[in-house]
Image (spheres, rainbow, N blue to C red):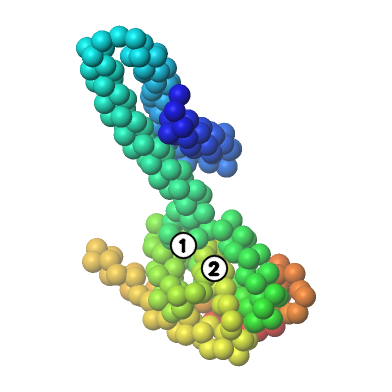
Amino acid sequence: MNTEVADRESDEAAVLEEIGALLKDPQYEGNPLRPFLQRLYQLHRRQSDRLLRLVRISDGYHGMARHNSDTLAARIEREVMRLKKIARISDLYQRQLRELADALRDASLTDPLTGLRNRRYLTDRLREEGVRAQRTRTPLCIAIVDVDHFKEVNDRYGHDIGDVVLCNVARALEGVLREYDTVGRWGGEEFLVLLPDTTLENGFKIGERIRARIAELRIEDSERPELRAISLTASMGMTVLREDEDVFDAVGRADTALRTAKHAGRNCCHTA
């Protein structure tokens, strides 16, 4: 078997191993992409087995070609062309497998309701930003935003409207934050905001813009005009990572500051 074919088989084996590991990972159970990835994975395995058999047949023909006529050489050439076609199809399957694996991985890090990053992604991002901030000695501002009286919205208008409210808040947060900031759904009606290279003073100014943007939100529904009466506010706890501090200790301090903001009457930002 020539070097090109051997390299191709090595690449395919690596891709199959990665996809197989993803499919065995229990955290992806129930993911809508998983059944399609499973089917494509099985199809690719069958296609690879067929390709391997054809390559072996082709290797046999090449050995015979040294002792047979030009007619056999023509037959081998046709077989080689056929193998090239199968190889192109195999490359396509590999690319599709990689794309599906990337989509599955991305889905596992995304909140399905708001489209923001989920807690798992935020946890990893916190570690990364915490390490970077400590290494470069630059400030990292951390904020937790909580939608005020969200339970009352659910109780009065239903959970479907509550979902609409959360999506609107998510878009408001994205509209205020900078390109290099990070925001995600921390849980329930809480959102976590990471502001790299930002002092507590500047972070507070961003927090105030967030509060103002959320207060401006109105729920538009032509069939339910009463929804425009929904008045939204948000409370916020904010802190900055201290020197040589574990980033999750800072998150705990931001959470304590959030509770202080709620006890102070809500619709405010408290720093710690």
Which amino acid, mark 2? Phe
The answer to whether residue 165 is visible is no
The number of numbered discs placed on residues in the rendered structure image is 2
Residue 29 in picture, x, y percent from top left: 53, 38
Q: Residues within 10 Å of mark 1 (few under 14, many from 20)?
A: many
Q: Is residue 153 above or below residue 79?
A: below
User: In percent of the image, x 54 and y 68: which residue is there?
Assistant: 191
Residue marked by disc 2:
191
The answer to whether residue 24 is visible is yes
Quarter of the image for residue 197 reads bottom right
Q: From the viewer's side, name the closer residue of 123 and 48.
A: 48
- Give the left or right position of residue 90, taking residue 237 as reference: left
Q: From the viewer's side, name the closer residue of 237 and 218.
A: 237
Q: CA distance from mark 1 to mark 2?
A: 9 Å
Residue 157 in picture, x, y percent from top left: 40, 62
Q: From the viewer's side, name the closer residue of 202 and 266.
A: 202
Residue marked by disc 1:
116
- Give the left or right position of residue 58, taking residue 196 as reference: left
**Mark carried by residue 140:** none
Marks 1 & 2, CB-CB < 8 Å contact: yes
User: In percent of the image, x 45 and y 48: which residue is there?
Assistant: 102
User: In percent of the image, x 46 and y 78: which residue is there?
Assistant: 178
Q: Secondary structure at mark 1?
A: loop
Q: From the viewer's side, name the closer residue of 78 and 120.
A: 78
Which of discs 1 and 2 lies nearer the camera? The answer is 1
User: In percent of the image, x 34 and y 31: which residue is there?
Assistant: 87
Q: Residues within 10 Å of mark 2 (few under 14, many from 20)?
A: many
Q: Quadrant of the N terminus?
A: top left
Which amino acid, mark 1? Leu
Q: Is residue 129 above or below residue 83?
A: below
Q: Secondary structure at mark 2?
A: strand
Residue 16 in picture, x, y percent from top left: 50, 33
